Image (cartoon, grey):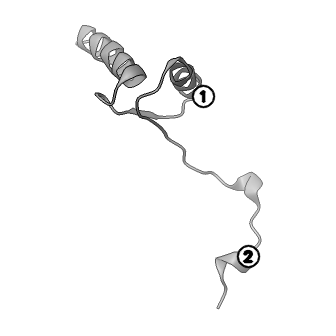
Amino acid sequence: MNFLSSCTIDISALTIPVISIIVEGGIETIKTVYHAVMRRIPVLVLQSSGRATDFIAHGYNITAHKRR
């Protein structure tokens, strides 16, 4: 039986899914979200958790309604 811990893995060919989860936060969180979006990393913003998340969610809601 082979165990994963004893295997050699070529990490250059390895794809790891990534998502950014935002809870509350401040100005640095907004910068982090910006950089994540620019790198096409999905961002989950927990609306109503306070501060930066509420600001981001409000902006998204305004623009989402304008696109309809």
Residue at the far top: name it: 66
Q: Determine crowd level at label 1: few under 14, some 14-19, many 20+ residues with C-alpha closer than 10 A.
A: few
Residue 24 circle label: none
Q: Secondary structure at mark 2?
A: loop
Q: Which residue is mark 1?
A: 39
In this rendered view, identify the residue nearer to me: 17 or 27.
Answer: 27
Residue type for callout 1: Arg
Judge from the rendering whether residue 8 lies leftward or rightward of residue 20; answer left or right: right
Q: Quadrant of the C terminus?
A: top left
Position in image of residue 65 (x %, y %): 23, 12
In the depicted structure, whether residue 45 falls above or below residue 7:
above
Callout 2: few (<14), some (14-19), or many (20+) C-alpha neighbours within 10 Å?
A: few
Looking at the image, is 7 positioned above or below residue 30?
A: below
Report, in whole angstroms, how far the alpha carbon at label 1 lies from the one at label 2. 31 Å
Q: For residue 7, which numbered disc appears in the image?
A: 2
**Mark 2 belongs to which amino acid?**
Cys
Q: In the image, is residue 23 above or below residue 12?
A: above
Q: Secondary structure at mark 1?
A: loop
- Along the line of sight, the residue nearer the viewer: 16 or 56: 56
Instruction: Work out whether mark 1 precedes mark 2 in sequence or the reverse, and give the earlier one.
Output: 2
Question: Does 40 sit left or right of 48 as displayed?
Answer: right
Where is residue 21 shown, x and y percent of the image? 45, 38
- Is 14 placed above or below 63 here? below
Residue in the image at 38% along x and 24% along y: 53
Quadrant of the image containing the N terminus = bottom right
Image position, residue 26 (x, y; %): 49, 21
Residue at 29 percent of width and 16 percent of height: 64
Dividing the picture into quarters, in which one does residue 67 lie? top left
The x and y percentages for residue 4 are 66, 76
Residue ID at (28%, 17%): 61
Q: Residue at x 52, y 17 (%)?
A: 27
Instruction: Name the residue at the bottom extreme.
Output: 1
